Image (cartoon, rainbow, N blue to C red):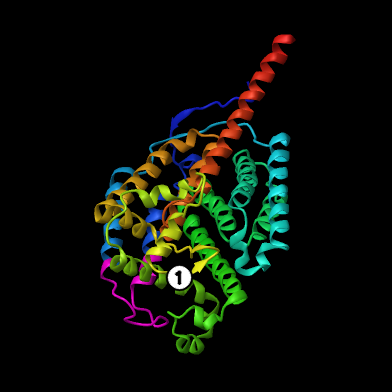
Amino acid sequence: MKNYLYERLRPEKKGSDSSVRHLNPLLLFILIYIAYNGIGLIDTPWTIAGAYDKTLCWELFLTGLAGASVALVFWGGHREYRIEPIIRRRTSRQLTALFFLMFTACLASAIFMTGGIPLFAGEERFGNSALAFNLIQLYGFWALVRTISSMETGRRVRYFHPILYMAGALCFGYRTPILIFVFVIFVYLITFKVSRGKGVVLGFCAILSIVIFSAVFAAYRVSQSYDFVIFFKNIDFRYINDHKYLLPFVPALAMFDFSQNTISTIGSALHEHMYGQLLISNYETFLPGKHWGARNIIGAITSARWIAGRPMSITPTLQGALYVDFGYVGVFFGFFLIVAIVGNLWRLTEKWSAVGKFSFCYLLTLSIMAIHNGYWDAGFVFFLFFLLIIRIFDLLKTMSSRKVGGAG
């Protein structure tokens, strides 16, 4: 019976490890939402003042904040009981080999199709296979499950697979897989492991590191094909030259402002709401033929330049994407539903295994990243595919064990 989950429900006791209060993940989502939009909404000395009208930007921001805050009232309270599961480790050699071979094959095909490592190929990376890019992340999901499993059981974390995955994923020339991997670990630690006070410190350090990495990575990609100063035209480089410590953060500072500029442009260019078409567009890309994803549609709405036969991918922010589909009502209820769903899942996570806790952290990570990106992209489907593979493997293993036991 050692290999099966055993769950025990009991009230928290003061002074025990189970009584440690962790950082509320719903509050984390709302605070990041406020910080991300706040930097872009206020008039900062490093951006060009009065470049666009921020009226719609403020209205959508406050509408989304209202929806999230109402949901926080109902689902943001701490839990009175905690369930302490004894879980089996997830270290299957068969699954490790399967996901590693899949990862290696996809990376090799991307290098072959590009004629070199896509990271160093500039905008030619956009011509890579989206299927290969998404399939490599299954290896990252498995590395996360193994890491969380080790932390849950108090065993030493092995870093070989996480480092190998992030190095390989970086070769594709995109930040997203790296950011997701790091953010999932960060969410797991502050939600399940460290105290609230340590979580705040860890959160500040982690988010600052993520911003620095994202800014440096973006600066490198821009410098491959464009003039750095001309590309970030919404930044006042006279101010940056007088405050050179801000130079490494220019891509991030420009992003905060550009996101609000995108919302303003959507407000003036959108003739009618799409009523869910933007939401499902990312998943229509699995259908035969050519289909634009949500960010490409936003690129078309905002008259972005074209690359590889389609409009440039433009991130609309979460409230911007909801507004395009459903207007102000959609923004309010969209944020309400996100916080409500995450809050309900959070109340169930203590009885979940390593795969379940990984799933919660991954979904919360996607929700946080959606604050910038807009709707979840097609990678979510591959997350479901990953869970299906795990489920099938467990069923086959159980059936095999029963046959062996019956024969014995």
Position of 104 compared to 349: left or right?
A: right
Q: What crowding class fits label 1: few (fewer than 14 Cα within 10 Å), some (14-19), or many (20 or more)? A: many
- The image quadrant of residue 58 is bottom left
Across and down, in percent, residue 379 comes to 53, 48
Residue bearing mark 1: 255
Q: How far from the left and from the top, in percent, is residue 206?
A: 53, 61
Q: Is residue 164 magenta?
A: no
Residue 3 to residue 231: above or below: above
* Nearer to me, 295 or 23: 295
Q: Where are the magenta residues, as a range?
A: 36-56
Q: In this view, does 198 lie to the left or right of 256?
A: right
Q: Would you say residue 55 is visible in this rendering?
A: yes
In the image, is 142 to the left or to the right of 8?
A: right
SS under mark 1: helix
Give 366 or 5, whichever is nearer the viewer: 366
- The residue lying at 35 percent from left, 60 percent from top is 320
Report the label total: 1
Q: Can residue 76 be seen in this view?
A: no
Image coords of residue 134 (percent x, y): 59, 49
Q: Which residue is drawn at 67% across and 51% down?
A: 162
Q: Nearer the viewer, residue 87 or 105?
A: 105
Q: Is the magenta stretch mostly helix, strand or loop?
A: loop
Classify 184 as above or below 395.
Answer: below
